Image (tube, helix red, strand yellow):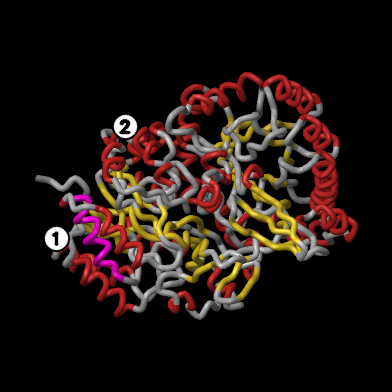
Amino acid sequence: MSLPFALSIGPLLYFWPRETLLHFYAGVAESPATTVVLGETVCARRHEMKLADWLDLGRDLAAAGKEVLLATQALIESEADLRLLRRIAEQSEFGIEAGDASALNLLEQAGLPFVLGPHINVYSRAALQEYQAMGATRWVAPVELSLDAVGQVNAGGTALPTEVFAHGRLPLAFSARCFTARHHRLSKDQCEFRCRDDADGLLLSTGEGQPFLVLNGIQTQSAATQCLLGERERLQAAGVSRLRLSPAAGNFERVIAAFDAVMNQGAPVAAWLQELAAGAPPGGLANGFAHGEPGLAWRWRAA
Amino acid sequence: MIRKPELVCPAGSLRALKLAIDAGADAVYLGLKNATNARNFAGLNFDDAQLREGVAYAHGRGRQVLMALNTYARADDAGPWYAAVDAAVRLGADALIVGDIAVMAYARRVHPQLRLHLSVQASATSHEAIALYQRRYGIQRAVLPRVLTLSQVGHVLRHTGVEIEVFGFGSLCVMVEGRCALSSYATGQSPNNAGVCSPPAHVRWIEHRDGVEARLNGLLIDHYAPDEARGYPTLCKGRFDVAGQRDYALEEPTSLNTLAILPELMRLGVKAIKIEGRQRSPAYVEQVTRVWRQAIDAAAVAPDRFRVDPGWTAALGHLAEGQQHTLGAYDRPWR
């Protein structure tokens, strides 16, 4: 029996020391996840892992039986960014998750198939068909799309294999400005790589102490951890076949275990949800986008 | 004398359109009264009759009307977006400003003669990205997101045959346009899905003895002392706590103003300069247009002797958000 939901490990969005990162992926290699997306998608200045290092890591994960994809940077600003992109497009060992239109242009012209990353805007069936014509073989829905809309865009799952962002702090926005550096009164060019100090990003709270957002370099994330563990039936109804779990510092193996147990082994959700809520970083859980509500909303009622 | 970029000004209403044209805009941009454009606010924008009249007014004076159709067609009904493309052609708009490839594909198929400008909402930040839209959809101009330095803008220009339009003045969007879900995270509505950011319907002002709270869907975005100037609670321009520091963690309430680098932008070959602000009053649009008309004309005649007239700065400063200006991402230290 094929799994109803394949589990994908999204690209690591934070800047972790190399040892921490390699230890993390060693754990992933042993996990029930089927797909691992590698590469630096947030900041071009983070280069502790060069492309050759990612390729090495990819080979290890492939040897452990994982499908490996290389993701391209979401925000392309310089010719150096484009050079890295071209090198990723030219390697032939792994599939590619396209991060922006620059990648799409290269990949379509090279005649290479690709996965559409979550930062490429697909809000309608017609748009998805255009990307399919360019060579998209799978798509990760934009985070603000509701599950109803996902089902409409992908024709209930019959248009293209569909992945949604199922667990982790949501990548909500990108900027030219590095907010982590700015917080430390540093310029982006001399940032001292301070984002390495924040394994799950730097928490931003409202004036009343309510966790709201997270600063992760040029990326702004949700403070709340999106969690679709309780949405099995709605995910199926929307034709979703893959769930993206976004790497986090604490307890990630339990996150994978939870999704495998609930989504694929039919384990009851309540106890697992409780565990994931207890282990989440400040901000709690959210699933509002899935319901067509503000993304930070959380709606859960035990059946 | 160097080539003058077009001055592209915002028209949230017919009155703003006429004042912008009279004050020297080469083109105005506007949207329909629905979710197909990214300034979907009550009381703004054009119905068919107003658009027809606006086009007649502009064309009668040798100017152009660009129609913004720059949100993403909805999954359950893309019809209004396609109808808006048809309306642009029927009512005589000179170009469509589009962000969604579904809309581009429709326009290209049904109205191949229609000029397409790539909206800033398409997030094309490199010449490779622009090349995709040129090759597949024949776009003739691209509006750059407000994330590139001046030298990066130059690099794009040297590697594309597509006309480049950049933002010159107005509210500063700190995030890459078309890729920001902060507003929908807080309120359910965003520029991409509803054409709004930090929508007014979710804003509450709550008076206290020690000042005023500005809330967005219940979230405290800012708190003003009784004598402090208040800004609109756009959520990326609020004051928040990060590691015990209360500050404008993302951006101050400030306006982008590129007058100081206008000759450089012109030398690079920028085809058009866009003024932000369809949500602003007709009087605002008129005053900003007048200043920029003078500045572009002066820079074209003598770029090397160009100086920002203190009168212009004073006039714009009066109109700027928080009375503050920044060069934004054009200037490296901002980043």
* Picture quadrant of residue B256: bottom right
The vertical placement of B70 against A67, above or below, is above
Residue A206's spot in the image, x, y percent? 58, 64
Q: Which mark is residue A155?
A: 2
Of all residues, the one furthest to the right in this rendering is: B311
Amino acid tagged 1: Gly
| Quadrant of res A52 | bottom left
Mark toward the start of the polypeptide (2 vs 1)? 1
Q: Main secondary structure of the magenta part?
A: helix
Query: Could you tell whether B322 is left or right of A298 in the image?
Result: right
Spot occupied by residue B294 in the image (x, y as percentages of width and height):
85, 48
Circles 2, 1 touching at the beta carbon (< 8 Å): no
Give the residue type that dot 2 points to: Ala
Q: Residue B159, image x and y in percent?
A: 53, 52
Q: Is residue B251 above or below residue B292?
A: below
Name the disc covering residue A254, or none.
none
Location of residue A292 (image quadrant) = top left
Provide the residue designation for mark 1: A65
How packed mark 2 is, by other alpha carbons closer than 10 Å (few <14, some 14-19, many 20 or more), is some
Report the residue at 57% width, 56% height from top.
B175
Left or right, residue A252 beside residue B290:
left
Question: Quick check: is A255 in the magenta stretch?
Answer: yes
Judge depth for marks 2 and 1 and give the one in front: 2
Per the rendered image, the range of residues in magenta is A251-264
Is residue A62 in the magenta section? no
